Image (cartoon, helix red, strand yellow):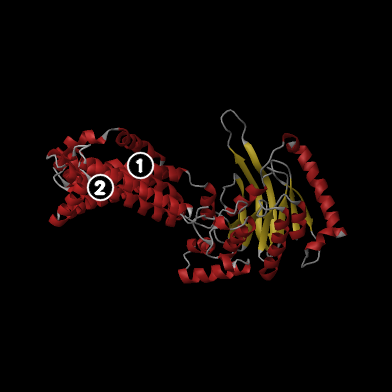
């Protein structure tokens, strides 16, 4: 068996063992199944939420909020990072705000956000945006600063102008940094969606977690929770694949 | 016909805090004929690369002027194409796209760009590699891409800044002979900076010897060796005479500058 196959088989096996042990403990009263729940109860809850359409609604709500929040963060982060990197005055002017947003525990602002933006979509998207946009902007800025002057010289030597410098050198040269920022931003945006939904919304996977937990429906809590874990893993994998494809040119 | 004229070219860098201004290039005069292959040699740091950058208009002279076909040179342009020592290829572009770079700046249509680029990639022998990225190529191959990129814009003058300086000795000789091959087909004017004496003789119609810093032209030597030149010409008696003359000239310059004692590097 190849090393890859070994790691896969053993990984799956270990996971299966854990689930089996959990189920056995729950059935034999070693843990309280009402509090801790069990794999079979969670499976049943999953089927129930799927059949009622609740899960699909939650997933759709969270996915849209995530896409809008992260998408906006991506556009704004790259644009602001580029502007900061290309113009010293913009950098000095914007820098304090960027670090303010980066350093502060943003979730403390949720009551204000609710007052300003209302309960629901706008607040959730804003939290996701604020959490993810700084890592994208800061990484883009680092990318612009790391541009190799010899690449700029090549474009200038052949008669290129400012526009050519930005679009033929600075932007493509910054792609590895931008992607690194985006990778961090993706995780933070997902965090933002869940937090936003928990504190500032009546919809989505995050809200369902708090609601089921308040009702002590432990098995039901696990359904949106597991969905989020799977979503996080899928997003991470997809971004890894995209990164590999975009960075083929690197040694 | 005189094509490129450099007149009283001077470049002075303003003083750093507490220091004296640095004179990089001191009143250089040079005239280059159309189709001539001129090599420029001089001690490290003498400003020979700087002169090339001034002709390319990537730097602005403190005084003096450069003119091409009687027109003053004010900005970089496709009439003077540069080949860089560090290749300066864009790593995220494959060979074909790198060669198309200069044509893009000129606004040549995409299909025509590809045609021209392919023709030049063929000429430097990289047909099979047009989809490769720079990191997948050897140093010699990368510089072939650099040469193809420069030739693609069909320049009046090719400015080559120690183009083979980063390559090992054998590849360097092969590249030199291939460059002559290409040059003999369309006889573009070439200004070629090097610190390799053999290379300077082997390639040139005329060698310009520059002084130690601040750089000026000390002497110009016409190279009267038959063309086309094979690699074996390097062992001929006449080649040896040129070599000795150049060695003596350069040794004097290096001693004067004292840079051999300080162990300075760079161009």
Q: Residues within 10 Å of mark 2 (few under 14, many from 20)?
A: some
The residue depicted at 50 percent of the width and 68 percent of the height is B113
- The numbered dot on residue B185 is none
| Lower sequence index among marks 1 and 2 | 1
Q: Is residue B71 visible?
A: no
The residue sitting at the right extreme is B237
The residue sitting at the top extreme is B18
State the image coordinates of residue A180 (x, y, percent, origin top left).
40, 46
Whether the residues at callouts 1 and 2 have beta carbons within 8 Å, the answer is no
Chain for mark 1? A
State the image coordinates of residue A23 (x, y, percent, origin top left).
24, 44
Q: Residues within 10 Å of mark 1 (few under 14, many from 20)?
A: many
Chain for mark 2? A
Asked where in the image residue A109 lies, by quadrant, the reply is top left
Q: Are marks 1 and 2 on the same chain?
A: yes
Q: Secondary structure at mark 2?
A: helix
Q: Is residue B203 visible?
A: yes
Q: Nearer the viewer, residue B74 or B182?
A: B182
State the image coordinates of residue B218 (x, y, percent, origin top left).
76, 47
Asked where in the image residue B207 lies, by quadrant, the reply is bottom right
Q: Is residue B128 left or right of residue A202?
A: right
Q: Nearer the viewer, residue B149 or A192?
A: A192
State the image coordinates of residue A139 (x, y, percent, origin top left).
40, 43
Q: Which residue matches tag 1?
A: A135
- The numbered dot on residue A226 is 2
The residue depicted at 63 percent of the width and 37 percent of the height is B22
Q: CA distance from mark 1 to mark 2?
A: 26 Å
Closest to the camera, between mark 1 and mark 2, is: 2
Q: Nearer the viewer, residue B41 or B137?
A: B137
Q: Is residue A129 left or right of residue B71?
A: left
Q: Secondary structure at mark 1?
A: helix
**Up-down relation of residue B166 to residue B205 (above or below):** above
């Amino acid at each position: 068996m190849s090393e890859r196959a070994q790691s896969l088989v053993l990984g799956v096996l270990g996971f299966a063992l854990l689930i089996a042990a959990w189920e056995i403990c729950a059935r034999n009263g070693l843990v309280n199944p009402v509090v801790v729940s069990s794999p079979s109860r969670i499976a049943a809850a999953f089927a129930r939420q799927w059949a009622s359409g609740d899960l699909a609604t939650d997933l759709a709500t969270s996915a849209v909020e995530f896409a809008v929040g992260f998408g906006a963060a991506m556009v704004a982060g790259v644009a602001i990072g580029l502007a900061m990197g290309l113009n010293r005055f913009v950098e000095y002017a914007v820098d304090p705000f960027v670090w303010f947003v980066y350093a502060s525990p943003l979730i403390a602002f949720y009551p204000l956000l609710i007052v300003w933006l209302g309960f629901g979509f706008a607040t959730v998207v804003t939290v996701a945006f604020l959490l993810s946009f700084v890592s994208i902007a800061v990484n883009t800025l680092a990318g612009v600063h790391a541009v190799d002057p010899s690449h700029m010289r090549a474009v200038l030597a052949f008669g290129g102008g400012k526009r050519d410098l930005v679009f033929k050198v600075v932007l493509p040269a910054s792609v590895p940094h931008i992607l690194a920022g985006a990778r961090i931003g993706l995780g933070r945006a997902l965090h933002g969606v869940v937090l936003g939904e928990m504190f500032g919304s009546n919809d989505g996977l995050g809200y369902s977690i708090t609601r089921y937990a308040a009702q002590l429906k432990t098995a039901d809590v696990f359904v949106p929770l597991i969905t989020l874990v799977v979503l996080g893993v899928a997003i991470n994998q997809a971004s890894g694949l995209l990164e590999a494809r975009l960075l083929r040119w690197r040694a | 016909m005189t094509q490129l004229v450099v007149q009283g070219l001077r470049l002075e860098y303003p003083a750093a805090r507490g220091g004296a201004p640095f004179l990089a290039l001191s009143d250089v005069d040079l005239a280059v004929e159309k189709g001539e292959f001129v090599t420029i040699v001089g001690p490290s740091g003498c400003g020979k690369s700087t002169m090339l950058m001034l002709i390319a208009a990537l730097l602005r002279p403190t005084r003096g002027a450069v003119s091409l076909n009687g027109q003053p040179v004010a900005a970089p342009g496709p009439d003077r194409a540069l080949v860089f020592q560090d290749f300066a290829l864009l790593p995220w572009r494959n060979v074909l796209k790198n060669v198309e770079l200069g044509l893009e700046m000129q606004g040549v249509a995409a299909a025509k760009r590809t045609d021209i680029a392919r023709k030049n990639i063929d000429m430097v022998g990289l047909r099979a590699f047009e989809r490769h990225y720079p990191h997948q190529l050897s140093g010699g191959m990368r510089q072939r891409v650099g040469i193809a990129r420069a030739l693609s814009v069909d320049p009046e003058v090719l400015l080559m800044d120690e183009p083979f300086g980063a390559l090992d000795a054998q590849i360097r000789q092969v590249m030199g002979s291939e460059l002559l091959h290409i040059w003999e087909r369309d006889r573009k004017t070439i200004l070629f900076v090097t610190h390799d004496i053999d290379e300077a003789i082997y390639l040139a119609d005329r060698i310009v010897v520059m002084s130690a810093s601040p750089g000026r032209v000390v002497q110009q030597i016409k190279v009267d060796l038959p063309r086309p030149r094979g690699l074996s010409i390097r062992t001929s008696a006449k080649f040896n005479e040129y070599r000795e003359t150049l060695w003596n000239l350069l040794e004097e310059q290096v001693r004067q500058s004292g840079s051999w004692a300080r162990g300075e590097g760079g161009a």
